[in-house]
Amino acid sequence: MAQIHPTALVDPAAELHESVTVGPYSIVGPQVKIGAGTTIGPHCVIEGRTTIGRDNRIFQFSSIGALPQDMSHGSEITELVIGDRNTIREFCTFNTGTFKEEGVTRVGSDNWIMAYVHLAHDVRLGDHCVLANNATLAGHVHVGDWATIGGLSGVHQFVHIGAHAMIGFQGHVAQDVAPYMTVDGNPLSVRAVNLTGLRRRGFSNERLHPIREMHKLLFRSGMPLEQAVEAISALRGPGRDAAAQQAEIDAQIDADITLMLDFIAQAKRGLVR
């Protein structure tokens, strides 16, 4: 049996692995599924059609799986799906999705989510992300793997944030943020490549060089976006520095360039530049 505190209210229809822990005064609704090793702190409300994976730690006073804050949302049943090994700190609010998209709000795995973070309907949060205190993601925001969002930052509806991007403190994010970049200020602008984060993740100097080139082409050259994209495309394949011609590094570099080009092609709100 799951370890449920006597003061917690867990609906008999909820599906909890026997290793789940539910703290005092928490409430778990009938459509909730919680995987092995997950801990629910005191005074949490887990409701709606919510699926939570393994080894998550949800701290006190969080509201997980409530209806979306969308005035057009009716009685349709939508979902919240959370992956594995996430840390979700105090007073976080994650809402279910809407049928304006696929009806699911998705949180990946291995994320570090600090206090008072809000994930609105249809958000897609990747893996290994860090969301600092009071980061607020509006509906339909997509965040790539390894992204960092600074405290007190607000992200506008439908904005996409690329993998490995970093948003500084109190960012007002109304346009898409390209992968690998650090953005900061008001108005928001690209400051540099997120070199510290990339090096922490094992990016070699050979792999960083084309990313720096993409930064220059997109944000420092003064080129129109279409021309910069053509120049970035030319960075792929033969013709790079011989030091970068090892097969594994070469494949990584091509993948990094493809990630940037695909992100730009799918951008909905224009790039922060």
Image: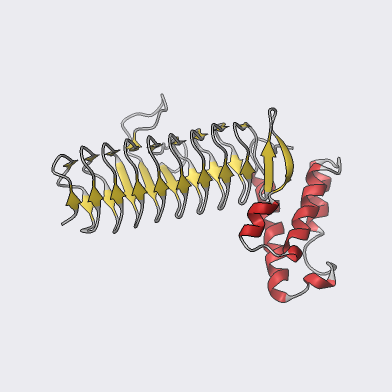
| Residue 211 screen position, x and y as percent | 74, 55
Q: Quadrant of the C terminus?
A: top right
Left or right of 28, for residue 194: right
Front-most of residues 166 and 247 = 166
- Residue at 60% from the left image edge and 43% from the top image edge: 161
Residue 37 in percent (x, y) is at: 30, 58
Q: Is residue 116 above or below residue 255?
A: above
- Residue drawn at x 51%, y 42% is 131
Is 190 situated above or below 246? Answer: above
Q: Is 53 positioned to the left or the right of 181 in the image?
A: left
- What residue do we see at 51% from left, 38% from top? 140
Q: Looking at this rendering, what residue extends furthest in the top direction?
A: 71
Image-based side of 198 in relation to 153, left or right: right
Task: Report how many numbered discs are placed on residues in the image.
Answer: 0
Colour mapping used in the image: secondary structure
Quadrant of the snapshot with the N terminus: bottom left
Extreme-bottom residue of the structure:
247
Residue closest to the eye, 97 or 12: 12
Q: Is residue 125 left or right of residue 267?
A: left
Q: Position of residue 9 (x, y in %)?
A: 17, 40
Image coordinates for residue 70, horizontal then vertical, percent: 42, 27
Q: Nearer the viewer, residue 244 or 71?
A: 244
